[in-house]
Amino acid sequence: MKRTFILLLAGLLLVAIPGCKSDSNYLTDTIKGRVTDAALDSLTTKSTETKTTQKTTSTSDYVPSDADAHYIQPSDYFIADREFPNSGWIYVYIAKVITAPTAQTKYEGQFMKVQDGKEIWTKYYWKSRIATKADIKIGAVVIMFDGNYQNNIAMPPKNKDEARNENWFMAKITDTTDLYKGYVTVSGGYKVGVDALRVPFK
């Protein structure tokens, strides 16, 4: 009887052990699968976040390839609501042309200010370019950025957002004796870095 019981018990153990091993393998495979899925999800999420961040950054920092060092584009105009006086200075604004000046419009153009989107008609408008050494002389009319001063000297805009959302002004060069220091003085007594000067033209 004892022998029969022992044989029966041994048989049950032989049947049970493979089953346990199978359950153990199933549990191990399940854990591995979940860990792998979690890792893949994490990598996918990080990759998506990185791409989104890169896209946002590249969009906000995008500068057209045809813009110059002051972030001014070929289609940009500087406009004013009044004529530049013989002395002092006036504010000017970056704008896009909506209706080109013609004889039918009395040579006034309709422009949209980039800074605030306001549309105005004016006959005071200029294209511009960065000044060269030959342009820097007493009495020359120039345009400067008014949003970046270093040691009380007006400097070029640091980025596109500054350039297109801060003020610019027009004045005359009144003193060039500090050129060797890298700046000139314009009407109104403002010091302006030589690399911050723009020349207006029609």
Image (cartoon, rainbow, N blue to C red):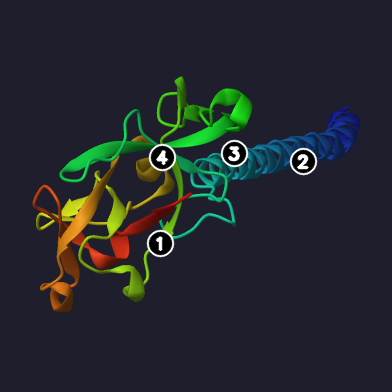
Dot in front, 1 or 4: 1
Q: Which of marks 3 and 4 is nearer the N terminus?
A: 3
Q: Name the residue under label 2.
A: 29
Q: How far apart are marks 3 and 1 (CA)?
A: 36 Å
Q: Distance between the residues labelled 1 and 2?
A: 68 Å
Q: Earlier in the sequence, mark 1 or mark 4?
A: 1
* Quadrant of the image occupied by residue 175: bottom left
Q: Mark 1 points at which residue?
A: 130
Q: Which of marks 4 and 2 is nearer the N terminus?
A: 2
Q: In this view, does 117 lie to the left or right of 16?
A: left
Q: In this view of the protein, which residue sits in the foreground, 127 or 15?
A: 127
Crowding at mark 4 (Cα within 10 Å: few <14, some 14-19, many 20+) = many
Q: How far apart are marks 4 and 2 (CA)?
A: 59 Å
- Give me the residue at 62% from left, 25% from top: 104
- Give me the residue at 37% from left, 71% from top: 132
- Give me the residue at 82% from left, 38% from top: 17
Which residue type does callout 4 highlight?
Arg
